[in-house]
Each structure stands twice: as C-alpha cells, then as structure tokens.
Amino acid sequence: MANILFDFGHPADIHTFYHAVKILKEDGHFVHISTLDRDIMIELLDSTNLNYGITYRRGAKLNLLQEIPIRSWQIFRQAQSHSIDVAVSVTNLTVGFPMWLRCKPYIAISDTEQAFNQIRTALPFAKRLITPDSFYHDYGSKQVRYVGTKELAYLHPDVYTPDISVLNEVGISPTERYSILRLSAWRATHDVDKHGLSYDEKIAVVNELVKYGKVIVSAEDEVPEEFQHLITNFPKERMHDLMAFASLYIGEGATMAAESCVLGTPAILTNTLDLGYLRDLQRRELMFSSVDGEKVLHKIREILDDPESANNFPERANQFIAESESLTDVLVREIRQHFP
C-alpha cells in the first residue's frame, strides 16, 4: 500500500479529486491532503469527510515568488513526515520539486493551455501530465490524454445525482425559471490579459435575464451595489444542485460553464479565455462563448425563448458523457499501475 498526497490549490480541486481519494482509500492506500487556505476551500473541505492539513495561509503581503519557496518547503516537510510515495495536484512546481528531491513520482493534472508557466516549471519534475484529449499543446511522452473534461470526475451520473430539494432551500418553486450569473475576481494566473463583459453590458444582461425569471448571482469578489439584491445565500456545496435545475448559466467562470454543460444546463461563457475543452464544448453545441454584449443578449433570448432547449441541451450532454472517460478512472488507473 502507498502513501499518497493530494494537494489542493483551488476550490475546484476538491471536487476534481474527491472520488479518486475515496477509491484509493477503499483500495487500502493512505491518502493525505494538503490545501491552501483561500476563497471557500476550507468551507468546502469541512463539508466533506476528508481530513486535511493547511500548508499555506495566503496573505496579501506575499507575492507569488515569495510564496513558492514557503509552500515547497511545507510540502517537502509533509512528504517527509508521511513518507509520501506519490503526489497528485494540478500542475504545480511547489509539489513537483519536493517530490523530485525525494525521488518520488509526481502526477500533474491540467486542462488549461494558458497555464503554460505552471506547466513548464512543473513538467520537468513530473512523471505524468494528464490532460483532456482536446488539449491543443503537446508535451510529449509524459502526457496522458483522456476523452472528456475534468468536471466529469465529480458530475458524471455514476457519482452525482442532482438534489432538487435545493430549490426549496433558496425559495424557488420547482416550476419557476431561474438563471445563474457568475462574476469572477480575475486573479488567476491564466486570467492575465483576459476580460469579460463591461460593467454596462453586465447590467444589460441582468435586465434581460430578469424578464425570464429569478437571477442568482455567484461572485468570487465583492458584488456591485446594483447586483446586491440578487445575492442568494445557500451552502456553497449545493451550487451544483442549483446549476442542474437552472434554465441558463451565464458568466466569466470557465469551470462553472463546463459544469453546466455536463449537467445539461445551457451555458454562455463571457470570457476571452481560449482552451481546448471549451472549444470542444462549443463544437458540441453545449456552450456559447462571447464577450460581445449584443451577441450575448441575442443568445440569451435564443435559448430562453426556445421551449425545445430544455430537452436539446440534456440530450447533447448525455451524448458527450457517453463518449467520455472520467478523469477519476484515468488517475486511479495510473496510480494502480505503480501501486497495485
């Protein structure tokens, strides 16, 4: 049996790796989790049955170059103290380098071509780089591709069933239409030189959405005063349930857009981010992407005015799922090859 370390650097990592952690524990492996203390990560982790250790509490006074050696040292100490045999994370130098120093394998995950700095610095220390097959950069023999998106690791019908009781919790009738608007903080490294709609265009979007029903705003940062009345309080771990029954997702978050797609909810991405899996979802007509305000308004009307769209998107999502492989299966298979 192996000692396995999973490092979480983003709230999405908790969802992405949750089922792999569960399966590996059932296999008899000892799984350790390290996490940053950022955004809602601790709140999400506390809603699971996972034990974790905080490796770094992100503060405003430290920049990335100062943070890297601190996190690397903390990961190294944790790997040493728990005799870690293999580590897994989204591509991260602060995990790869300590494992390389210990002559132990590191498995990196990525679906973001724009994160080339993270990939470039972590890849020399990685044994594997696992990416979607739609990933349009080639990193050679270390790269392992799978069909699908990472969101299927936790939203595949085999592991997730939407719970409609969330509607009652937020005061929405099962027959009531509602849309979800996501506002990003634009602090991620892959957000550099990217942008979404202008402030006035966002106001126009909200004014259009309210014509069709309730609007729920989800935001990484402070919400503008004009949107404050749209904030709905609900447990963050119920977001996927809320997304599953929405008439439309629209926003700047690419991960949430992809989540909506696999849930069969129409998605409009308002972000200039260009990724392979986003191209694939658009090709499959599961997503529309634009930062042109007029085009976005037109697409909102096209989707919400069409009664057939309620069936078209779930049907296309089911076809996509049938052709895909879960990242969980790929990751577990990779680890089992080394530690049966």
Image (spheres, rainbow, N blue to C red):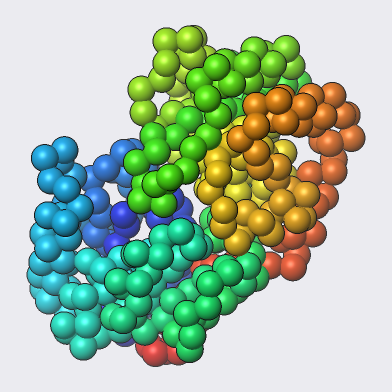
**Front position in the image: 223 or 239:** 223
Q: Provide residue 182's location: percent of width, then percent of height.
A: 52, 31
**Front position in the image: 295 or 266:** 295
Residue 107 drawn above or below residue 301: below
The residue under the point 16% across, 56% down is 65
The residue under the point 72% across, 39% down is 266
Residue 78: which quarter of the image?
A: bottom left
Judge from the rendering whether residue 238 lies leftward or rightward of residue 97; answer left or right. Answer: right
Of the 4 image quadrants, the one containing the C terminus is bottom left
Q: Provide residue 188's location: percent of width, then percent of height.
A: 36, 46
Judge from the rendering whether residue 132 lies leftward or rightward of residue 189; answer left or right. Answer: right
Residue 72 drawn above or below residue 229: below
Judge from the rendering whether residue 128 lies leftward or rightward of residue 65; answer left or right. Answer: right
Q: Provide residue 144's location: percent of width, then percent of height.
A: 52, 80
Of the 4 image quadrants, the one containing the N terminus is bottom left
**Front position in the image: 95 or 277:** 277
Q: Provide residue 59's location: percent of width, then percent of height.
A: 15, 41
Q: Let me know if residue 18 appears in the view.
A: no
Q: Let me know if residue 65 appears in the view.
A: yes
Residue 130 drawn above or below residue 258: below
The residue under the point 69% across, 16% down is 208
The residue under the point 78% across, 49% down is 285
Residue 75: which quarter of the image?
A: bottom left
